Image: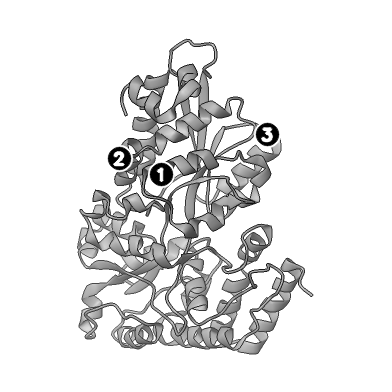
Amino acid sequence: MTTRRDFLKVTGGAVAGALVPRGASAAPKAMSVVRESSFIKPFDDYFSKTLLPEYEKLTGIKMSYEATSVGGMLTRLTTIAETKSGPEIAMTGLNQALLFDNSLVDVTDVANGIGKQLGGWHENVLEVVVSKGKWKALPWGNIGQLEVYRTDWFKEVGVTKFPETWEDLLAAGRLLKKKGHPFGFELGHGFGDNHGWLYPLFWSYGGREVDRDGKTVVIDSAETAKALDFCRKFYQETMFEDVLGWTDVNNNKAFFGEQISCTNNASSILVVGKRDFPEIAKVTDHALNPAGPKGRFHVMNAVSHALLTHAPDQAAAKAFLKWLYDDKQLSRWLTSADAYYAPFLHGYDDHPMWKPEPRYLPYKESLKTTRPHTWPGPQGPAASESVAKYVLVDMFAKACRGDATKDVIATAAAQLKQIYKAK
């Protein structure tokens, strides 16, 4: 979209008419966007150095970009919401659009327009961006957490296709550890790679933290016990002890240090490998998380844009979002990320972004079985508290270090009852 006429078609009506002419008194002079830095630098660069200047040239509105450090967006968003000042448009991740519901503008009209243009939204994303029937953020993609593994080492032990089930992966892991190629799955207090496999493992055995009512804690179950007993065995027989203290950087370092043969991660390992470790990249592949007795699951991290209520010209900010999410812009932007973000729009299910590197395709496929943290319980402050306090992570980590199954379940249940105020 490079012309004023194109812009008018997308943004429509009086809003666009007020914005586009340079020097128009009704047009805002500047707008600002804040987002957490991406692990994929070309994605950030394309936004700040190509898309924002394009919009500025098109409308005359000075566009500013603020990047926060990885993991710092929640703190920045809290400050913006509390002070009612700062950037008008902000990134949200996880379920943050629901946490800051009262500070975010209803963008249902924009979401509906985008969905109509681009094949409709994947319904599972609504759980983390729709509050009381209103869209509070617009997702641009999911940062998937899948299995990342060394094809050459798996072949050495006779495994030519990634195992379909957790039990089969355990069997492969035993052989690989014996050959000096253990697994490395994070069990410490990181922010992504621990949740990326523990929630899916938990769900795949039928485990649940809290019921859909958001009150009834249901973690004390036979299904939870089976998941824990499996995980303890998986840890003891396929990994080394260090993973109990790992955070999100450790598995990446161990993979490139050729210490581990398999981990759970976003596609950034392959992206970095192709750039800095080409020989390792050649033998790196991805696979969906294994299935358990109750199915196959993946954890959701939908990254989105939200519009803050303190924005002096909400119509102008919406016009920018309409422009950004038009296919002419969104398509180019997503492609610049090397398929790191899987879009929640069906119009991109077979997009050319997936063609150059078939090894990224599992991240697209995983959207079908992606669920938000603490699913099937409702998203909101209690769910966030459970994740922030590492209730599930610590339950599994303690079981892996040797604590009794019944004891770690009892501790987790007590924590959750306090969090969800259950009786």
**Up-down: is 191 above or below 409?**
above
Give the residue pinned by disc 2.
Answer: 332
Decide which of 119, 146 is in the foreground and name it: 119
Give the residue pinned by disc 1.
Answer: 116
Decide which of 336, 236 is in the foreground and name it: 336
Residue in the image at 42% along x and 42% along y: 114
Q: What secondary structure is marked by label 1?
A: helix
Residue in the image at 34% along x and 64% along y: 365
Q: Amino acid at mark 2?
A: Arg
User: Badge 3: how crowded within 10 Å, few (<14), some, or many (20+)?
Assistant: some
Q: CA distance from mark 2 to mark 3?
A: 32 Å
Decide which of 15, 405 is in the foreground and name it: 15
Give the residue pinned by disc 3.
Answer: 84
Q: CA distance from mark 1 to mark 2?
A: 19 Å
Q: What secondary structure is marked by label 2?
A: helix
Callout 1 touching callout 3 (CB < 8 Å):
no
In this rendering, would 329 be left or right of 387? Answer: left
Q: Amino acid at mark 3?
A: Lys
Decide which of 330, 152 is in the foreground and name it: 330
| Whole-percent x, y for residue 359 in the image | 25, 62
